[in-house]
Amino acid sequence: MRMMLLFGLVAAGLLLAVGFIHMSSIVPVYATQWTGLINPTQVAIGDYDNDGLNDIAIAEVNGGKVTVYKNDGTTVIKQWTGLSGPIGVAIGDYNNDGLNDLAFTEVNANQMTVYKNDGTTIIKQWTLLNNPRHVAIGDYDNDGLNDLAYAEYGYSRVRVYASDGTTIIHQWTGLSGPEGVAIGDYNNDGLNDLAFTEYFGARVTVYKSDGTTVIKQWTGLNSPEGVAIGDYNNDGLNDLAFVDFGAVTVSVYKSDATVIKQWTGLSGPIGVAIGDYNNDGLNDLAFSEYDTVTVYYQTTPGTGIVTVSATQWTGLSMPQCVAIGDYNDDGLNDLAFAENVAGRVAVYKSDGTTVIHQWTGLNSPIGVAIGDYDNDGSNDLAFAEYGANTVTVYKNDGTTIIHQWTGLNTPVGVAIGDYDNDGLNDLAYAEFFGDRVTVYKSDGTTVIKQWTGLNGPVHVAIGDYDNDGLNDLAFTELFGDRVAVYKSDGTTVIKQWTGLNNPEGVAIGDYNNDGLNDLAFAEHGANKIIVYKSDGTRIIKQLIGLNAPYDVAIGDYNNDGLNDLAFVEDDTVTMYYQTTRGTISNVAQPTIVTLRGTLSTSSGYPIQSGSIRVTITDSFGTPVWEGTLDNVINNGTYNIPLGATTTLMLVKGQIYNAILEVDADSPIFISPDVIFGDNDPEGDVIKFVAD
């Protein structure tokens, strides 16, 4: 990997670039419609406010406004008014900082603007355009960074800009009335493509990312306008929808050009979008007409690659905890859950029907975990019995007891994993009324760590949440209304969420399948489950409107290579399957980071010589690299390729900080005269993303 950081003595540049993934939750409705609009044109579906739930943006060309609605169809997140003929609108992470932005075009002002999700900060604005129409945000050149494409009707072209807003990745010229544009993987080969419509050319064309190869072209149309790429029928394969204005139709085609769906007899349709607007895990389709925007909801998953979207066990007797792992050591993951009132713990194969083993007659079982506790190469199963005040670990024969702790004080959650990172698995459990969490080595006697004085600890999880190669431990406190993640020293808090509503279950794992671990927890009182990335801020997924969820687990239950999410509520255990893989980014690899800039005194005179000490830290402030670079300042300038002589190992997609200590006019670094990037004063930070 190679990257470049440019900054001077006084001001440090800020660059963040990470991907995003759409979220889903449960909002069962059939359609939403906005009426009485003033000539709505393009519509876009995406998570603009970055809360894990998709929203919809609508441009009204003669109304002079762009409005973003939450998925209730009523709440306005943001509205821009007084615009000059807004036509195109798109939601996506254009500046690649992990947060979605919004772009729109103004046909009468001949400009295009991209706003951050605060609705005020302008990331980029293009002026002196010639009749710009629709716009799209996506990674067209498949380099891991989102780009922006737009149709410029007046210049008869479609252009794609990189996220710097200057570099033109590709452009098509000599077109006949370009209108709509969309970025997405239409032919489902893993690489994004670009589609555009030509109003007077009466055609829709899809190009591969080389900008030359035509994947598909529809001709002989009647004034096509908007176009969208997405998995409309939820079969795991992307489709393409376009508006034929003159024919008053909206059509959706599979990648083999088979028609999936067509709306006819519409009233002046223009824009179209595909996305999961009601956040139920199924993509929907929205289109605009003369004075109306309508979203049609899909209610059933497709029958292609994704044969099922979920497995569910119902009619259970107060299920409390769930775990995913290969209990019978056949190379395929299984699922275990405890039924508190029924006094039962059962392990199911991935078909959801076959019971591998079942323990009955238990005394209020709650917590359950799968893992190789005795480190013999075969997985075991542990569960806590709330009523018996015991935690027991069984071998995978379901009979042999490896270890049992007795005389506990209402044990609840249990987890198996290598917490102290010595290569041997350990076991942690929470004692609810004992107000403590304890981690034991595999001998069952040696205590690695114990947290006391907690406020109703419930569930516990072991895993590498901060993706530094060392396992961490997370636990929830029901009465303390918090979730905390500790490093293996048992003292350093990586992340803490407070002010929650009765948090119970917690899990660590790579939910969005991007190679980096995430953390999920269930808020029993708030009826929701949230999955956070390792920065503890970005929400990957949010499930709302649940029925008092107790626990959550992350793992590949259907053994398709993609991690899934299971959760427990009232009398049900549900497994949601992931169908798409994120950008793999968890392997640290040799990286070159180039620092280039100028240094001068407060009087403006260049510093003639000097040395710099550079420290690279991860997003949690943990140093990952440090180097002293002697005599690297020459007549006020420096150009330093970090990692060129001493290997710099960074994880692609991870956010890092750089701290520069400058020793002016010293050929050998002794002590700093000035420091950049240490957040002193506040805001003095240098961030970058390994790409």
Image (cartoon, rainbow, N blue to C red):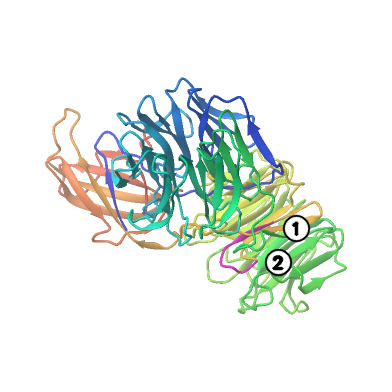
Q: Which quadrant is home to the N terminus?
A: bottom left
| Secondary structure of residue under mark 1 | strand
Q: Is residue 381 above or below residue 499?
A: below
Kindly identify the amino acid type of the residue bearing the numbered disc 2.
Leu
The correct choice, above or below, for 216 with respect to 393 in the image is above
Q: Is residue 425 above or below residue 539?
A: below
Tell me if 133 is positioned left or right of 478 in this view: left
Please tell me whether mark 2 sits on a helix, a strand or a loop. Answer: strand
The picture places residue 580, in percent across and down from the top left corner, at 54, 58
Q: Quick check: 146 left or right of 58? A: left
In the displayed structure image, the side of residue 615 where residue 39 appears, left or right: right
Relative side of 264 to 455, left or right: left
Q: Say if residue 278 shows up in the picture.
A: yes
- Image coordinates for residue 261, horizontal then vertical, percent: 60, 50
Residue underneath mark 2: 335
Q: Bounds of the magenta span? A: 558-566
Residue 440 occupies quadrant: bottom right
Q: Residue furthest front?
A: 220
Is residue 561 covered in magenta? yes
Q: Is residue 654 visible?
A: no
Q: Which residue is rendered at x = 78% and y = 62% of the image?
A: 338
**Quadrant location of residue 474?**
bottom right
Seen at 64% across and 61% down, the residue is: 303
Q: Nearer the viewer, residue 659 or 23?
A: 23
Q: Which residue is mark 1?
A: 573
Residue 595, horizontal then vertical, whole percent:
25, 47
Q: Quadrant of the C terminus?
A: bottom left
Q: Evaluate if marks 2 and 1 touch, with contact meaning CB atoms under 8 Å apart.
A: yes
Q: Earlier in the sequence, mark 2 or mark 1?
A: 2
